[in-house]
Amino acid sequence: MNTPRAPRLLLILLALLTALLATPSTAIAQLTPERLYFGVGQRVPVQIDVPEGFVGEVTLHLYDPATKEWTHKVPAASGRVDLTSLLPHLWEIKPRTVTYAQLELDGVPTGAPLVLQPLVTPNRAVLAEPTTMNLTEDPRTGEVVFEDKRIPALHAQGKRESGLREVTFSGFRIYVDQEIVMNTSMGQIVYRLRPDAAPNTAYNFLHLTQGGFYTNIIFHRIVAKLPNGNPFVIQVGDLSGTGSGGPGYMIDLEDSSLPHDFGVLSMARDSNPDTNGSQVFVALSRDGTSFLDGRYTAFAEAVEGASVIQKIAAVPVGPEDRPIDPPMLQSCTTRDAPPIQDRLPALSKVEQQVPVQPIGEPDR
């Protein structure tokens, strides 16, 4: 007896669905820590999830973003495991910088990596006279200097007994690596956080994003180009829209290893180095923003949305660089970052064609 056409099509679709469900998918494979903070010497329980029915090799691989090298590959298994049992040297790794733990299935990096951020004494910034290294509150004569540079200089002048900065290692902050998705009135921009470059600043922005801070606020400052023609910045992150607001607290300036370049996200502040909060600016070129390196904390880089950044930068402005019809940051959300080897390159080489605007520094 012939099967009617419609039921036959239904049987084919059911067979395809059954085959798909029976095929292990790496999309659900993930490393997840039990909590956010772990003190020195404590166990570090994490959950390793792999697709149901997967019978291949499960491994963990550490990645050093400073050297861009993979290190310490170890066998693992699905379920709850102690990271320090798999990686007993974890407490001894030096220098104390951010590393990533990546899950691999049959040698293929799978799921978002874990960010392993050491909790260490911050490298504080001050305003100091460049020759004497004496503290000052005058931004016209003082320069931003971090302790790891100032203390040896004071020691060399005989003003300190030691030239070493005391650093205490307290443990780890461990979380699933995230990307930031900015939904603006002109389109979407996707950012890769760079906790390896500025860990505390990156986490502060992640915290504000997950709390819904960046919802329906305007880009209140646009300086598309400097008088010399170099593209400069667009600025957002003030709930009041005035350019003077923030999240109700301030964080320290952090010495970032990420250079300012097109699409790089950095913290805005006033003349005091430690007045960072929620206001951020997007750099529009390397030539126009290189002088901000070491003075402002860059902590993320755009991987999608170059044309959106350019559109915002091209919005007409009035006095004090305020846009006449301000673009809106409608929402800022997070999503799990891709495996390290699957990451898109940063949008750092895109050419800009935007109108000339007055000079100025990112401020609050």
Image (cartoon, rainbow, N blue to C red):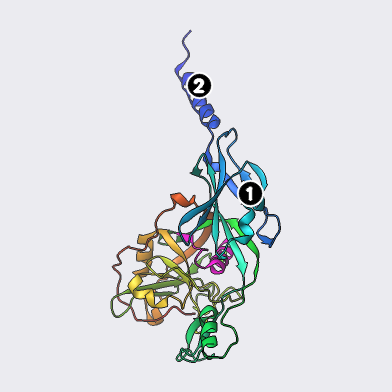
Name the front one of labels 2 and 1: 1
Residue type at mark 2: give it: Leu
Which residue corresponds to mark 2? 11
The residue most toward the right is 42
- Compute the Cα span from label 2 to label 1: 47 Å
Can residue 87 be seen? yes
Q: Is residue 221 left or right of residue 165?
A: left
Q: Which residues are magenta?
A: 191-211
Whichever of callouts 2 and 1 sits on the residue coming sooner in the sequence is 2
Disc 2 is placed on an element classified as: helix
Residue drawn at x 60%, y 64% as measured from the top left: 118
Q: State the image quarter where residue 51 is shown.
A: top right
Residue drawn at x 42%, y 66% as measured from the top left: 264
State whether residue 32 is above or below residue 286.
above
Residue type at mark 1: give it: Leu
- Tell which of 129 and 261 is nearer to you: 129
Can residue 316 be seen? no
Disc 1 is placed on an element classified as: helix
| Residue 16 position within the rendered picture, expressed as x and y whole percent measured from the top left | 49, 27
Q: Is residue 120 left or right of residue 221?
A: right
- Tell which of 10 and 204 is nearer to you: 204
| Residue 351 position within the rendered picture, expressed as x and y whole percent measured from the top left | 30, 65
Residues tagged 2 and 1 counted as in contact (Cβ below 8 A): no
| Residue 326 position within the rendered picture, expressed as x and y whole percent measured from the top left | 42, 71
State whether residue 166 is above or below residue 83.
below
Is residue 178 part of the magenta span, yes or no? no
Which residue corresponds to mark 1? 86
Q: Residues within 10 Å of mark 2 (few under 14, many from 20)?
A: few
- Tell which of 173 and 59 is nearer to you: 59
- Tell which of 314 and 139 is nearer to you: 139
Is residue 202 part of the magenta span, yes or no? yes
